[in-house]
Image (cartoon, helix red, strand yellow):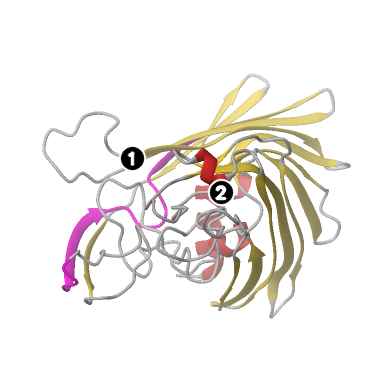
Amino acid sequence: MNNKIKLAVAGAIVSAASAANAGIIIPAGDWTLDIGGNVNAYANFSNTDKNVQTISGSVAGMNSAGLDDNDVTVTTGLLPNYLSVSGSTRQNDVDVGFTISIQPGATTSQSLIQVGQTNQENRQAFMTIGDKSWGSVKLGKDLGIFGSNAILNDMTLLGVGGAHVNANNTTTIGGIGTGYIYADWRAQVTYTTPNWNGFQASVGMMQPWNPQGAADTPGADNDTIIRGSHNNPGWEAQASYAFTGEALSGKIWVEGMYEDMEDLYISGNLTAAGAGTDSYTADAWGIGAQVSAGNLGLVAYYYDAEGVGTTGKFARGIFNDGTEANPDFKGRDSDGREI
């Protein structure tokens, strides 16, 4: 598929609708409504060799006996099924918009599945205010900033990826965890600058999140890390430069994130954890480039992080498996690269 078309479709799926990727346009007084959606399905046949460590939720898991594992599912790809409604208007010299979307899961694994037992996500619910002269502000839930370009340029975005995910999940995970951390869908207040001849930057104040994954406290398997307080927000930022030429076009970007993980303790083991006393700092930076020449597109990306998370038994997203076990709560180093 033509790379430009692929990226346009990707943008339509994971971001607010615009004139460039419009669905059904409906004039409504001073407002213009845009309804869009996507439905996809794949039959997946996967095999995992015995004694292979797998990413949780990514591939057919190794069974407890250490034998080969074959798995079959009919599910969506990395892109979810979705239905999105967006609206835009110009009021008092300010552009105002909103987007709300739902992503219903498409797979089941047993009879008489009830409503709510299959995965359904509500990834987007945000509004924007702005103007071309000073930029825009986004308030609500949308794709995070850090790692967003990595997944939007993932070549598996319109497919399944390296392997399938088990039934009852919303999507497969494509290339997530194989070079980049999933940006995920975060509650945020984000300011984006105007586009200055291709240069643009965004800074977002994020709802602080808890660490995820097993803490593995000595003598207590699979205890969970609990975050006792959310005193400070998380921060994500990205600066990019897009260029277009007769033979070559593309985009380069740098990005970063920072969040204090305060007052951590272990669920059910407060005394051993030193309840309310342990903290660490999660931070990361990344750099990437995407270049297109005709139908050929190349992407290169690298990130380095501490305490943010990495690919592992429990990890494929932000703050998954990002800390050492109790009692130190030291952020683990991680990095990734994708070409």
Which residue occupies the foreground of this view, 223 or 13?
A: 223
Give above or below for 150 relative to 224: below
As drawn, the residue found furthest toward the right would be 133
Which quadrant of the figure contains the C terminus?
Answer: bottom right
Calculate the distance from the C-alpha at mark 1 to the C-alpha at mark 2: 27 Å
Of the residues shown, which amino acid type is indicated by label 2?
Answer: Asn
Image-quadrant location for residue 44: bottom left
As drawn, the residue found furthest toward the left would be 111
Dot 1 falls on a residue whose secondary structure is loop
Residue at point 55% right, 46% down? Answer: 273
Which dot marks residue 21?
Answer: 2
Q: Position of residue 31 (x, y in %)?
A: 64, 24
Other-residue count near label 2 (Cα within 10 Å), few / some / many at <14 / 14–19 / ≥20: some
Queried whether the magenta region covers residue 72, the answer comes back as yes
Which residue occupies the foreground of this view, 14 or 256?
A: 256
- Cβ–Cβ under 8 Å for marks 1 and 2: no
